[in-house]
Image (tube, grey):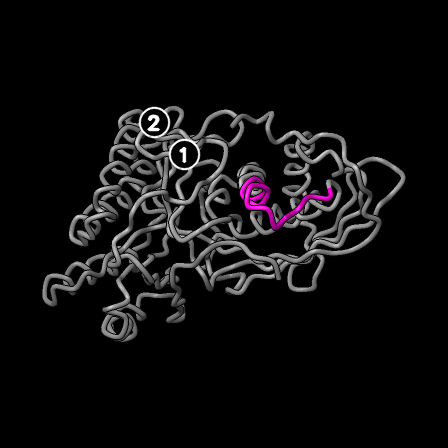
Amino acid sequence: MTIEDFIPQPYTEIAQKASVSYQSPSNIALVKYWGKYGEQLPQNASISFTLSKCRTETTLHYEKKSKGGYDFKVYLDGVREEGFEPKIHKFFQRVEQYLPFIDEYRFLIKTQNTFPHSSGIASSASGMSALAMCLVSLEAKLNKTNTTSTQNKTFQLQKASFLARLGSGSAARSINGPLVVWGAHSKIKGSSNLFGTPYPYKVHENFSKYHDTILLVDKAQKQVSSTVGHDLMHNNPYATQRFEKANSNLEQLVSIFESGDLDSFIALVESEALQLHAMMMASSPYFILMKPNTLEILDCIWNYRKTTNSKVCFTLDAGANVHVLYPSSEKKKVQQFIKNELSKYCKDGTYIDDIVGVGASIM
């Protein structure tokens, strides 16, 4: 597909005043995307687990108006959040050619997260994907689209992912689940730079109902934003090799997912996490987002795995937090290990138990 496929024909209906509500989860990349080009396009393909409990719930109230121009307000947990509005304005500018009705309506965007706002979990992926689902739902009413048609539903999910990407790159992976690929890859059928696609191949039962406990090491705002970090890859001396390695790792994951080889999964996923942060440290100017307690947690996980032969492993987001990944067969033991050993390295002892989910849905 091309971007022209997402430019609609003239609308046939008018929706005067109503609302629509969607929830969309966050996701955690196993093979990382770090570095982009053009309009929110990835330099390498990535793949992620879609989460379940960490999600954003958004209601979009809309009302037809006579005068053109963007007209919207954003509320978070019932309170006007003017600080979010410049980002939404930029998002509207990016998507207007694909949603021409955007300046014909007055919008009230009411949103809330199921995880604490100060938890240190990036809400851009869940937030932008939830808003994109609401907008695509409104467009379906203007087109009088049959949303029960499999073909129409697939296209709408693709368009929502395409739009969400223009707000936050990783948001492209939150629309579907449990495994989503974003970025064109020669070995992944149907993969695209324009939107995320459900992983199309066999996945061993070892990876079903996988768990992710998010250890909240630092709740403060990151010293360097992800946007700035992505931009610094343009001059990173290791960027080209990193993009090639990420695509190679994704190809390796195809066979790992099929065979159920958890040891190979652990080695690849942890290496990916550390490479992400290595790119930050190799940037100019360089920066470090990990904290001392991040490293303490990694060391504890390595020691625990060595002494117990557990299949627990970690991955990292673009920050200090640690995502502890483990199969459902080890849920009880690993969660006890987290409570007894790892929670002391978390800010205020805070962590969130989550599990792989299926993506966005109407509320």
Residue at 40% x, 70% y: name it.
Answer: 348
Q: How many numbered marks are there?
A: 2
Classify residue 70 by image quadrant.
Answer: top right
SS at badge 2: loop
The quadrant in which the C terminus is found is bottom right
Name which residue type carries label 1: Ser
Q: Where is residue 38 in the image (x, y as percent from the top left)?
A: 51, 25
Residue at image mark 2: 236
Residue at image mark 1: 191
Tell me if 257 is positioned left or right of 348 in this view.
Answer: left
Q: Nearer the viewer, residue 287 or 248?
A: 248
Q: Where is residue 83 in the image (x, y as percent from the top left)?
A: 65, 49
Name which residue type carries label 2: Asn
211 versus 254 height, above or below: below
Q: Earlier in the sequence, mark 1 or mark 2?
A: 1
Residue at 48% x, 52% y: name it.
Answer: 122
